[in-house]
Amino acid sequence: DQQVKQNSPSLSVQEGRISILNCDYTNSMFDYFLWYKKYPAEGPTFLISISSIKDKNEDGRFTVFLNKSAKHLSLHIVPSQPGDSAVYFCAASPIIQGAQKLVFGQGTRLTINP
Amino acid sequence: EADIYQTPRYLVIGTGKKITLECSQTMGHDKMYWYQQDPGMELHLIHYSYGVNSTEKGDLSSESTVSRIRTEHFPLTLESARPSHTSQYLCASSEGGRTTNEKLFFGSGTQLSVL
């Protein structure tokens, strides 16, 4: 049973336009959500996060939106740049003390076309 | 950013060999993790540690074992590698404390291929 789902395996966007990556989750115990970016043969790097007490968090070109009632979050990148081409993973963390046991989605491969 | 190092980056070995994947971090983080990832799939937690002498199995069953004798070191060992172990192995760490809202810092990963 996959608790975090990224239903689009790939997305292609024109340079300068907005990229929107989506993520759905099923576990209502998740209270913290993160986006990671991953290049081939590299480890994931942290991009942006959001707590369940917020519905939006912005950091430069990156904005994450959280809709708790729909159990849905999205990552907006604007304007998109060629260096944004990578695989993006959505991750969620439950309300449990102790080790940060993140649950990851399958990833969405974003390609920015010049 | 946290400094977390994995060696080797790539490893090709034959079936039945014993291997150890190294992971070290210099941030003094208490918590360390091993994830396994196949192309197009999610990252699966296979081991984690709260601190020295603490190791726990993750959500995905794995034939590998880990040890945590020093805070900065969290090696993963496969006693007898098989082709089904072919995957990318990612080590991560996070700060200790009671907060649950922590981000993980990942190493560059080890791409393991077992022939």
Image (cartoon, coloured by chain):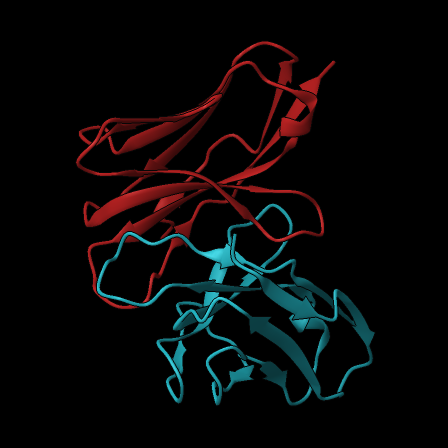
Q: Is residue A73 left or right of residue A68?
A: right
In the rendered image, is residue B115 in sight?
no
A47 lies above or below B39 = above
Q: Is residue A109 left or right of residue B52?
A: right
Q: What chain is colored cyan?
A: B
**Residue drawn at x 21%, y 61% as measured from the top left:** A96
**Which residue is pictured at 55% across the width and 69% down the height?**
B25
Chain letter for the red part: A
Specify the quadrant of the image occupied by residue A65: top left
Q: Which quadrant of the view contains residue B15? A: bottom right
Image x and y of residue A47, in percent: 48, 38
Give the quarter of the figure containing the C terminus of chain A: top right
Point out residue A51 in the picture as x, y percentages from the top left corner.
Answer: 25, 40
Measured as percent of width and height from the top left, residue A91 is found at 40, 46
Decide: is B30 above or below A14: below
Total numbered labels placed on residues in the image: 0
Whether B83 is drawn above or below A45: the answer is below
Name the residue: 54% across, 69% down.
B26
Q: With A44 as the anchor, is B56 left or right in this view? A: left
Q: Can residue B109 be seen at all in this image of the molecule? A: yes
Q: Nearer the viewer, residue A78 or B44?
A: A78
The image position of residue A11, as x and y in percent, is 59, 24
| Residue occupying the point 25% across, 54% down | A94
Tell me: residue A31, above or below residue B111: above
